[in-house]
Amino acid sequence: MLKTKLLIRFVVIAVITFALVLGTVPLLGTFWHLLHGDTISFAGQAVPVPKGFYVRQTPSGPAMWKQSIGRPFLSAPYAHISLFYRPRGDSFAFDKDRDQFKTQLAQDASEEGYNLSTEQTISLGEKRAYCLEFSRSSPNIGSLVRCAIDGSAIVVFYEGDSRYVRDMQTVLRGIARN
């Protein structure tokens, strides 16, 4: 009888803990913004952090995350934006580097089950970003967007639900303003 009561208490506590974690994950972005504001510094530039995103520092640069209820345990919409330097640290030159950028990224994405769906140049005022968007339909629906900013060594990579791609474009525009 005592063991049954202990087991029931343990299960109830585990279920409550699980529910709290699932409910808290989407609030990480809100809490992050309250503590840190709306921008981060990367490569000497102020970079906007979209609403609902939080930032984790990685060895290669900052990573912005947006989580939905159910993450990380259930399949739910999410977004991940990474900022880092080009491999050799040199600035992206659209006319010189575009073809190699496209070939390498298309090969990498293909190995992960993605297909090139959109190739575009986004005007960022005086600068432009060359972006490739990849998508897949199964087993996990999602988008990959890879962007290089002309005249900059910074690249922006996005992975996640296609509904959050606009947030990545906000980050691009913020980098270009600096």
Image (tube, grey):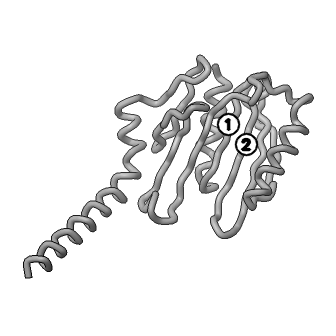
Mark identifier at residue 96? none
Circles 2 and 1 in contact, beta carbons < 8 Å:
yes
**Residue annotated with mark 2:** 146
Q: Nearer the viewer, residue 111 or 50?
A: 111
Q: Label 1: how many residues lie within 10 Å, few (<14), some (14-19) or many (20+)?
A: many
Q: Quadrant of the rendered structure where residue 150 is?
A: top right
Residue 70, percent from left and from top: 43, 62
SS for dot 1: strand
Point 75% across, 54% down: residue: 134
**Residue annotated with mark 1:** 156
Residue 140, percent from left and from top: 63, 65
Q: Quadrant of the rendered structure where residue 152 is?
A: top right
Residue 58, percent from left and from top: 54, 34
SS for dot 2: strand
Q: CA distance from mark 2 to mark 1?
A: 6 Å
Point 73% across, 24% down: residue: 153
Of all residues shown, which one is farthest toward the left? 2
